[in-house]
Amino acid sequence: MDYFLILELPEEIQALVVERVASNSFQDLYGLRASCKLIKALADRRSVCHFYDVLYVPCGLNMPAELLKTCYVERNPSTLYMKGVQFFITFNLQEEGLAFMKVAAGEGYERAVIGKLVRSLKWAWGSLHGDEFRAKRDEFISTIVPSFYSCQCVPVLERDWVLWFIENSKGDKMCNRCFWIKEVGLFFREFEPMSVIRDTREW
């Protein structure tokens, strides 16, 4: 394989490389920043904040509040999604929360990415589910999940009323409503409620 120096590329291509690295890994981005002053300047541009995935910040790296606010201003999809989840669950603002999640999807979070985020959210440190959270989950299972299986958008492969295998119940070409029911189901199944979280209403 032939190798080439990134500094030999046009500046706009260098910027694209930095953005791609930012979306892939914080560790790789900080390694890239240390390579030279020019790349550091590109990596420190405000617009790069749009590409961070704040849900995958390495453990032990506490993102400054101002950086999270900047990511939100730059319409960073992961901060939009985080804000939507907190509004939906913590503040009981379902419409506003879902609106933020939809904006996150419109900013580039495709179905597979949102599914990955929902299934991997780890915002707690061993906290137990509160009564309100369990009540919302039980209500969702009893009132919303049945419509997922009754919808005939695609054939039902397997029925699962307690969310254990809901991701395997229908094929990928299900309607948007069923897709979101599945994702919220995965969220209720695996979300660990956070006892200490930055108040995203300040963003």
Image (cartoon, helix red, strand yellow):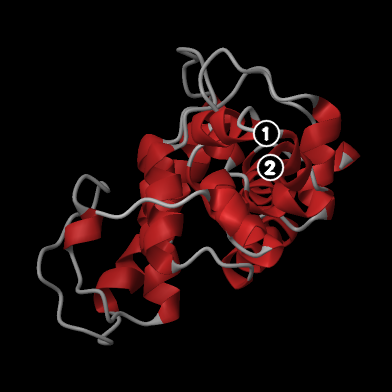
Q: Residue 139 in the image: x percent, y percent? A: 46, 49
Work out whether 134 lies above or below 48.
Answer: above
Residue named by callout 2: 39
Q: Quadrant of residue 107?
A: bottom right
Q: Quadrant of residue 154?
A: bottom left
Q: Crowdedness of circle 1 by 10 Å Cα count: few (<14), some, many (20+)? A: few
In-front residue for pair 19/91: 19
Would residue 98 be found to the left or right of residue 178 on screen? right
Whether residue 93 is visible, yes or no, is no
In-front residue for pair 50/29: 29
Q: Label 2's element?
A: helix
Residue drawn where x is 45% and y is 43% of the image: 137
Residue named by callout 1: 36
Q: Residue 85 in the image: x percent, y percent? A: 62, 46
Q: Quadrant of residue 16?
A: bottom right
Q: Crowdedness of circle 2 by 10 Å Cα count: few (<14), some, many (20+)? A: many
Residue occupying the far bottom of the picture: 153
Would residue 8 be found to the left or right of residue 122 on screen? right
Kind of residue indicated by mark 1: Cys
How far apart are labels 1 and 2 at the CA level?
A: 6 Å
| Rendered image: mark on residue 192 | none
Q: Which quarter of the rendering shows the N terminus?
A: bottom left
Q: Which quarter of the rendering shows the C terminus?
A: top right
Q: Residue 69 in the image: x percent, y percent? A: 83, 40
Q: Disc 1 vs disc 2: Cβ atoms closer than 8 Å?
A: yes
Whether residue 137 is visible, yes or no, is yes
Residue drawn where x is 20% and y is 71% of the image: 170
Residue occupying the far right of the picture: 202
Would residue 174 be found to the left or right of residue 9 on screen? left
Residue drawn where x is 57% and y is 35% of the image: 32
